[in-house]
Amino acid sequence: METRRKFLTGILGALGAAIAGLTVYPVFKYLSPQATAGGKGRVTIPKNQVGVDQAHFFQFQGHPAVVLQKSPGVYIALSAVCTHLGCIVQWVPKKDEFLCPCHGGRYTIDGKVIAGPPPKPLPSIPVAMSGDNLLIG
Ligand code: FES
């Protein structure tokens, strides 16, 4: 009887640890700083992946970045890392602005701060065009 109780206790402990791990890991992954490693080169994105007033998120030098087509043929690329505490901004097309979900920081389509705690604009990234592609960086 004692052996059976120990076995069940062990199983429940292992199951609890597994559930805790599955719960905590995504939170840890979300809150942990972004990796700094990454390629230093340009990123090539096909123009057809970036519609007018649409945001296309990608990794640039190991950090989240975003490219938008502000108006037909006019593109802008920005870091997608909020300048407050480093959360990843979201694009809100109905308002033509970026929103940081962490503390409500808001940025214009050009990355300028509209409201909230961000101390600086989103850094811009050079964009060039080559045929059907955007060369970013
Ligand atoms: S991290 Fe973006 S507003 Fe605080």
Image: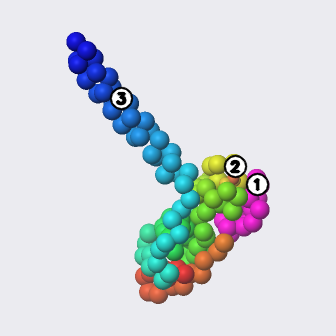
The stretch of residues the image draws in magenta is 107-122
Q: Amino acid at mark 3?
A: Gly
Mark 1 lies within 8 Å of ligand 1 (Cβ measured): yes
Point out the residue furthest to the front here. Answer: 2
Q: Earlier in the sequence, mark 2 or mark 3?
A: 3
Task: Give SS at disc 2.
Answer: loop
Residue at x-position 63% and y-position 59%: 86
Q: CA distance from mark 1 to mark 2?
A: 8 Å
Mark 2 lies within 8 Å of ligand 1 (Cβ measured): yes
Residue at x-position 55% and y-position 78%: 73
Give the total of numbered labels.
3
87 vs 3: above or below: below
Instruction: Residue 48: say if magenta.
Output: no
**Residue 46 appears at what percent x and percent y?**
42, 76
Mark 1 closeness class: few <14, some 14–19, many ≥20 residues within 10 Å: some
Point out the residue furthest to the bottom here. Answer: 130
Question: Horizontal placement of 19 versus 29: left or right?
Answer: left
Task: Give SS at disc 1.
Answer: loop
In-front residue for pair 90/19: 19
Residue 98 lies in what quarter of the image?
Answer: bottom right
Task: Give SS at disc 3.
Answer: helix
Q: Which residue is mark 2?
A: 104
Q: Amino acid at mark 2?
A: Gly
Determine the quadrant in which ligand 1 lies. bottom right
Q: Which residue is mark 3?
A: 13
Q: Earlier in the sequence, mark 3 or mark 1?
A: 3
Instruction: Residue 110: say if magenta.
Output: yes
